[in-house]
Amino acid sequence: MSQNSKEDFTALAYSEQGKKAVYPGSFDPITNGHVDIITRGLKIFGRILIAVLENPVKEPLFTAEERTAMIKEIFSREPRVEVKSFGGLLVDFARNHDARVVIRGLRAVSDFEYEFQMTLMNHKLNPELETLFMMPSIRYTFLSSNMVKEVHRLGGCIRDLVPPIVEAGLDEKKRQAERSIS
Ligand code: ADP
């Protein structure tokens, strides 16, 4: 390969092995950190399948349908991004959708232990499935869905942290919560 030519990246993105990656998570809700990882992933893979976990361990604020719908809307102009909700084992979901690579985002050292364990387990369940870790832009390394929800709940500004549709969704959830209290 010649160095860093556009053709090289295209060849990598559309090679058989690099064709499709799955990016799993709770996305409760999707943040600009997730969007940054997906945008970077699209430079490497031909297609990215975003796999929205139906029932995360912690009760989600948004239903799986709401989380999926918001992500679909955000990437509505990007035909290379597909969004589906899933339950069960990630290895089965990836196999059923013909994806051989899992993308995960790494923010800080604190993410490492959990990600390391999960990757080893997935590798044991299916040695053919590779996991690729990507780091976001430095401005998103502190960002998590939980942090966004908490700041928004307390009245802080989250405009630079999430896409507009997510901010609108959080506003609506807050209104619903206030109505149910009064
Ligand atoms: P989970 O509930 O599995 O942790 P999340 O929806 O929180 O899933 O995140 C999905 C993936 O995106 C995880 O690999 C997580 O580390 C990564 N991620 C979340 N927020 C960011 C961020 N701000 N920058 C980079 N990666 C992130």
Image: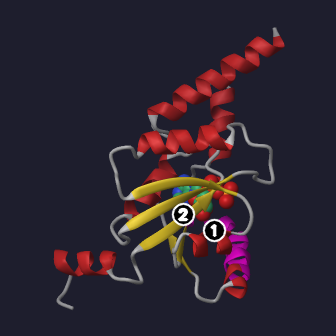
In the image, residue 31 above or below residue 128 = above
Q: Magenta stretch?
A: 104-121
Dot 1, crowdedness within 10 Å: few (<14), some or many (≥20)?
some
Q: Which mark is residue 169?
A: none
Q: Which residue carries the number 1 mark? A: 93
Judging depth in this view, the residue of 31 and 50 nearest the camera is 50
User: Quick check: can you spot residue 137?
Assistant: no
Res 160 quadrant in image: top left
As measured in the structure, the alpha-carbon distance from the residue carrying label 1 to the one carrying label 2 is 11 Å
Image quarter in which the C terminus is found: top right
Q: Which mark is residue 23?
A: 2
Image quarter in which the N terminus is found: bottom left
Say if the magenta span includes residue 108: yes
Which residue does the image show at 57% across and 66% down from the upper left?
A: 106
Q: Amino acid at mark 1?
A: Phe
Beta carbon at label 2 within 8 Å of ligand 1: yes
